[in-house]
């Protein structure tokens, strides 16, 4: 959701900005723009649509300059259009600014400035910032950093901003609150790179600073970076060395990032297990270090959104089954506003791929303020959520670029499985034999996923048959119920086909009314103690003419007799089945969307990292 890139140094900025915007395309956006400072002129170019449209617009223009900022905008206030695209410029045309986040009190600030004669051209909340900064600068005769500080004092909401000034060709200003911003430091401070995450920076430098909330960085060529707070206290920048595999940022021969990421799963899950899943034990340092705090909790509350929420539903079953600790799973967006009984006796587990989801971050802050202990399960290293937690476990599946989450889901479920097993052992409530069986089975999961992936061609064929459908129903029980929800979400996200996930037995309380010959029903029906009951549900669908696609355990002859189409997954422990049964559903959604000719990696209206409410 919105991406910022900036450069100040000795190289031409434009190619770096465009390259960086392309790296951030996965976040989701609908317009793009850039501003370059060259020979005392500010050149601003914008385009509705893709970064390639922006390149096209700039083709015949002056794209010179070694200082520039750029942006991809995901529309919140105002339609996607050239005028609403960033950068926005000040009244005099001397300042240009890009912004991620939402300024909640923009209407009142705008009204006040309009009364002073300031004019506005866009419908955005962002334009207010650049106009307010210039207004303060002129009125108070202060320097740019002071004007930025004062303006941000007045702004309520979330922001990551980057700002350049025609009169300061040697300076780039950035600031953040609740929206991410990373600064890459080139050799000898000769150049600096800024971006919403480290992926556009990684190919130039490994030295990165992640700004904290309410910090402003004053970046000047050939000078050490200066970081101040909006209260004007200087802070020591915390420089980190990042380790991003650049191969992970490319499609590696696959037609889409999503397919690559589905196929990455065996390998990245091995990475996630490395050093944690040993032949005879599970070692999670967060559990070792905080064992007493975790085991003395009266309950766990899992907060997350989207796919991460589905992983949380599986986590609840794992932790309640193996650790006998009550677990609630909450949508972060609901939890943050509801009156809740959370207090210091609770452990809150925040699950997030991006580590930047605004609702999850706000849910953490709320739980923290009530004294709860916060445990993070995050993918993006150094992200806001990772930094806001007391401890946690990174899922280490590498950057996920496709908007529809795939490898992050299995990474989250894997970490939750290891967490449940490690906690159960620490609590002494799992038999040694069961403990070793689960460890052994977890170790086999990557090879078993490979076996499911071998059915890719068949699933592609199957998908073609079902592209006609307008509705899909996904049903599952127990550990496969969240998988059914996730399968339905994948399909609707990228194929725009309406799909609903339900616990299989709930079908008779409503969805059964929808079933006819036009309605494919996907049963996630691996071996389970309620196997016979699922067969009854299938018969109910069959007798109403519904078409059944069943995900079954290898060799399940009963299901094969009933279902129209069957996809087999290898046998595993029931609690680990989601790691296998979700794979065919990811592939099914992918191939349906491809067959419909849709933009799989950047589906309409969706964003990868939802940094606004
Ligand atoms: C967006 C993404 C989803 C993701 C959800 C939660 O909606 O498109 O794929 O599951 O946000 O994001 P998080 O990064 O917190 O897991």
Image: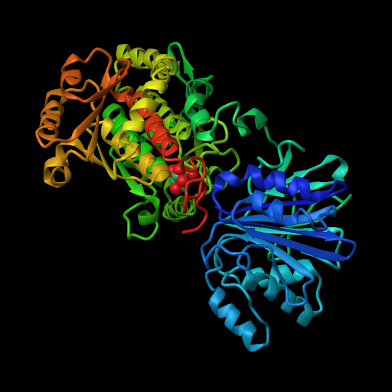
Instruction: Provide residue 396's location: percent of width, then percent of height.
Output: 54, 30
Q: Please report the residue visible at 12 percent of the width from the left and 28 percent of the height from the top.
A: 533
Query: Which residue sits at x=31%, y=32%?
Result: 465
Residue 282, given in percent of the width and then of the height, sits at 44, 20
Query: Which is more toward the observer, 243 or 448?
Result: 448
Q: How many marks?
A: 0
Q: How is the image coloured?
A: rainbow
Write the residue at 55% across / 38% down.
Answer: 401
x and y percentages locating residue 555 in the rendered image:
24, 12
Q: Is residue 364 above or below residue 570?
A: below
Q: Is residue 378 left or right of residue 136?
A: left
Q: Is residue 396 above or below residue 33?
A: above
Residue 340 placement, left or right of 384:
left
- For residue 405, say whether it is visible: yes
x, y percentage for residue 174?
Answer: 71, 58
For residue 169, which quarter of the picture? bottom right
Q: Is residue 234 visible?
A: no
Q: Is residue 28 above or below residue 163?
A: above
Q: Residue at position x 89%, y 49% from top?
A: 222
Quadrant of residue 135 within the rendered picture: bottom right
Report the front residue among 584 and 516: 516
Apparent side of residue 372 relative to residue 466 in the rendered image (left or right):
right
């Amino acid at each position: 959701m919105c991406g910022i890139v900036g450069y100040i140094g000795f190289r031409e900025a434009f190619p770096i900005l465009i390259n960086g915007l392309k790296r951030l395309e996965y976040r989701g956006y609908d317009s793009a723009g850039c501003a370059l400072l060259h020979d005392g002129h500010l050149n601003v170019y914008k385009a509705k649509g893709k970064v390639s449209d922006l390149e096209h617009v700039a083709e015949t223009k002056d794209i010179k300059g070694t200082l520039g900022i750029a942006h991809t905008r995901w529309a919140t206030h105002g339609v996607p259009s050239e005028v609403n695209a960033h950068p926005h410029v000040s009244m005099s045309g001397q300042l240009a600014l890009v912004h991620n986040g939402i300024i909640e009190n923009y209407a009142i600030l705008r009204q006040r400035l309009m009364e002073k004669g300031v004019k506005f051209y866009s419908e955005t909340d962002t334009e207010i910032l650049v106009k307010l900064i210039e207004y303060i600068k002129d009125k108070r005769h202060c320097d740019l950093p002071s004007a930025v500080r004062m303006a941000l004092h007045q702004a309520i909401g979330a922001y990551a901003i980057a700002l350049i000034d025609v009169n300061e060709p040697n300076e780039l200003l950035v600031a953040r609150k609740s929206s991410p911003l990373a600064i890459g430091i080139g050799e000898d401070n000769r150049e600096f790179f800024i971006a919403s995450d480290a992926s556009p920076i990684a190919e130039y430098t490994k030295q990165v600073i992640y700004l904290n909330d309410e910090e402003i960085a004053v970046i000047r060529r050939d000078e050490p970076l200066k970081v101040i707070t909006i209260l004007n206290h200087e802070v020591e920048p915390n420089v980190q060395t990042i380790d991003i595999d650049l191969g992970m940022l490319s499609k590696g021969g696959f037609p889409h990032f999503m397919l690559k990421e589905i196929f990455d799963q065996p390998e990245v899950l091995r990475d996630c297990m490395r050093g944690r899943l040993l032949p005879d034990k599970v070692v999670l340092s967060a559990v070792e270090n905080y064992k007493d705090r975790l085991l003395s909790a009266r309950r766990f509350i899992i907060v997350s959104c989207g796919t991460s929420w589905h992983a949380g539903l599986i986590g609840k079953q794992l932790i309640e089954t193996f650790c006998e600790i009550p677990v609630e799973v909450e949508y972060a967006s609901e939890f943050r506003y509801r009156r809740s009984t959370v207090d210091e006796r609770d452990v809150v587990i925040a699950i997030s791929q991006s580590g930047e989801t605004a609702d999850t971050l706000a849910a953490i802050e709320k739980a923290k303020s009530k004294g709860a202990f916060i445990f993070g399960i995050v993918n993006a290293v150094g992200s806001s959520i990772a930094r806001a937690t007391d401890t946690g476990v990174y899922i280490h599946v590498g950057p996920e670029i496709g908007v529809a989450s795939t490898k992050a889901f299995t990474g989250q479920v894997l970490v939750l499985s290891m967490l449940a097993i490690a906690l159960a052992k620490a609590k002494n409530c799992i038999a040694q034999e069961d403990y070793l069986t689960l460890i052994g089975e977890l170790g086999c999961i990557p090879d078993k996923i490979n076996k499911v992936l071998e059915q890719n061609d068949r699933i592609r064929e199957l998908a073609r048959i079902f592209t006609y459908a307008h509705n899909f129903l996904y049903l599952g029980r127990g550990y496969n119920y969240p998988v059914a929800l996730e399968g339905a979400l994948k399909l609707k996200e990228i194929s725009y086909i309406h799909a609903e996930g339900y616990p299989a037995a709930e079908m008779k309380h409503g969805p059964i009314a929808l079933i006819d010959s036009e309605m494919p029903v996907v049963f996630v029906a691996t071996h389970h103690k309620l196997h016979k009951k699922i067969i009854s549900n299938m018969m109910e669908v069959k007798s109403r003419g519904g078409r059944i696609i069943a995900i079954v355990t290898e060799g399940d002859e009963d299901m094969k007799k009933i279902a129209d189409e069957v996809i087999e997954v290898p046998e595993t422990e029931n609690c680990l089945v989601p790691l296998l049964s979700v794979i065919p559903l990811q592939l099914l959604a992918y191939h349906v969307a491809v067959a419909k000719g849709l933009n799989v990696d950047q589906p309409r209206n969706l964003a990868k990292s939802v940094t606004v409410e």
